[in-house]
Image (cartoon, helix red, strand yellow):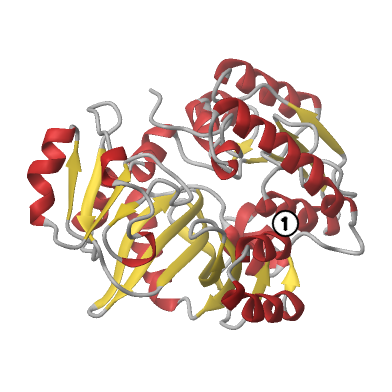
């Protein structure tokens, strides 16, 4: 098959590139940047630089359509937040090839954290008590109702804007920095104490073809995960099955949970690929993405992989963390490093320097800069 993958900056996209390439498929890959993790993988037949979907959505869709026609693409598989721009052009692109996502009307309801919580609650799934805040005055009026609270924008990622008076995010960002508007509202919800649980799944018309539940033992700065360990997936699978069947969902979907004292709470949804894909066998991952009839594959517990360089960088000057971090770095397989495909490890440096330049130019954090040109924040 001829496979088109987008956003080669992401480790999960590199995972898919290698899985498809090693299985003999022809991989065409794209990004808005020339130097990315996947741009120089030996398993990429060609890497194409496209216009940025956030800043030039029409030109981005034009570029994808040209590639689909010229390279006779069998499957277009978006991986990161450019999926929303692909979904906006779903009818147009799906006339040319099979597109592994759902239309924008479906994805938009999942990405908006409050609307997703409402949908989950309507399906009988446990979620934290949550209200939508559209102004500073409304925030100050409702805040006393939430003695232990979490605040986050309705559209956000990587937990970089979370404000809380409890848990690991307590006091990291001042409450005064929360400035909700009707166009960019925030969620105010109960803080639930407990360990985080994540899941990644592939679905075709509501049928789950591949699923992985995982914990994140280490994060970078309390946000993005840098180590991933699979856990028993049957409880989260049941939730994904209920949600997928209700939506007749096609595409990749990732859920975040907290395990509270009274059970699992569903927090939010990312209708795209996430790090659980690193823990799924390549053959089952390919089948999950491209074979609608594949029986549901669930990753067994105990698998662990990591992003070793961010793992070490995240420890920083916290000396108490170093023994555990060093032990992890020496024990588990790295997602990027591969002797059979060495160039992605080397391209980390020019890619990081490029995003550092964008971060400085746009006055964003380095993490936020990595999605500057592909993120979607509710654009109609």
Q: Is residue 229 above or below residue 9?
A: below
Q: Is residue 132 left or right of residue 365?
A: left
* Nearer to us in this view, 327 or 249: 327
SS at circle 1: helix
The residue under label 1 is 15
* Nearer to us in this view, 206 or 52: 52
* Nearer to us in this view, 52 or 29: 52
* Nearer to us in this view, 209 or 145: 145
Are there few (<14), some (14-19), or many (20+) residues within 10 Å of tag 1?
Answer: many
Residue at 31%, 39% in the rendered image = 177
* Residue 200 seen from this side: yes
Residue at 73%, 81% in the rendered image = 331
Q: Is residue 70 left or right of residue 77?
A: right
The image quadrant of residue 121 is bottom left
Residue at 79%, 29% in the rendered image = 48
The image quadrant of residue 275 is bottom right
The image quadrant of residue 58 is top right
Quarter of the figure that contains the C terminus: top left
Q: Is residue 94 above or below residue 101?
A: above
Please give the count of numbered marks on the rendered protein: 1
Residue at 27%, 34% in the rendered image = 179
Residue 314 drawn at (x, y percent) = 61, 61
Residue 356 drawn at (x, y percent) = 67, 37
């Amino acid at each position: 098959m001829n496979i088109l993958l987008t956003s080669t900056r992401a480790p999960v996209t590199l995972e898919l590139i290698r899985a498809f390439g090693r299985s003999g498929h022809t991989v065409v890959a794209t990004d808005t940047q020339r130097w990315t993790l996947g741009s120089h993988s030996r398993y990429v037949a060609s890497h194409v630089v496209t216009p940025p979907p956030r800043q030039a959505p029409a030109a981005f869709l034009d570029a994808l359509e040209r590639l689909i026609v010229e390279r006779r693409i069998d499957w277009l598989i978006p991986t990161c937040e450019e999926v929303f721009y692909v979904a906006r052009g779903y009818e147009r692109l799906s006339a040319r090839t099979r597109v592994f996502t759902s239309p924008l009307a479906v994805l938009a309801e999942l990405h908006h954290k409050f609307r997703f919580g409402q949908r989950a609650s309507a399906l009988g799934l446990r979620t934290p008590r949550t209200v939508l805040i559209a102004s500073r005055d409304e925030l100050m009026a409702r805040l006393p109702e939430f003695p232990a609270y979490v605040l986050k924008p309705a559209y956000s990622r990587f937990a970089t804007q979370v404000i809380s008076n409890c848990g690991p995010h307590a006091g990291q960002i001042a409450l005064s920095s929360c400035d909700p508007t009707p166009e960019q509202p925030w969620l105010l919800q109960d803080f639930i104490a407990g360990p985080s649980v994540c899941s990644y799944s592939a679905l075709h018309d509501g049928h789950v073809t591949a699923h992985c539940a995982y914990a994140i033992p280490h994060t970078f700065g309390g946000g993005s995960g840098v180590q991933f360990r699979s856990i028993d997936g049957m409880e989260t699978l049941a939730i994904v099955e209920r949600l997928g069947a209700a939506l007749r969902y096609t595409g990749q979907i990732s859920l975040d949970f907290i395990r509270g004292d009274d059970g699992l709470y569903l927090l939010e949804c990312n209708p795209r690929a996430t790090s659980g894909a690193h823990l799924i066998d390549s053959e089952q991952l390919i089948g999950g993405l491209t074979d609608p009839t594949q029986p549901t594959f669930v990753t067994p517990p105990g698998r662990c992989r990591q992003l070793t360089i961010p793992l070490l960088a995240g420890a920083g000057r916290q000396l108490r963390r170093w023994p555990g971090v060093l032990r992890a770095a020496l024990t588990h397989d790295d997602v990027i490093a591969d002797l059979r495909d060495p160039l992605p490890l080397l391209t980390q440096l020019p890619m990081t320097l490029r995003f550092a330049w964008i971060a400085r130019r746009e006055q964003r954090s380095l993490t936020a800069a990595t999605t500057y040109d592909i993120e979607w924040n509710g654009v109609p």
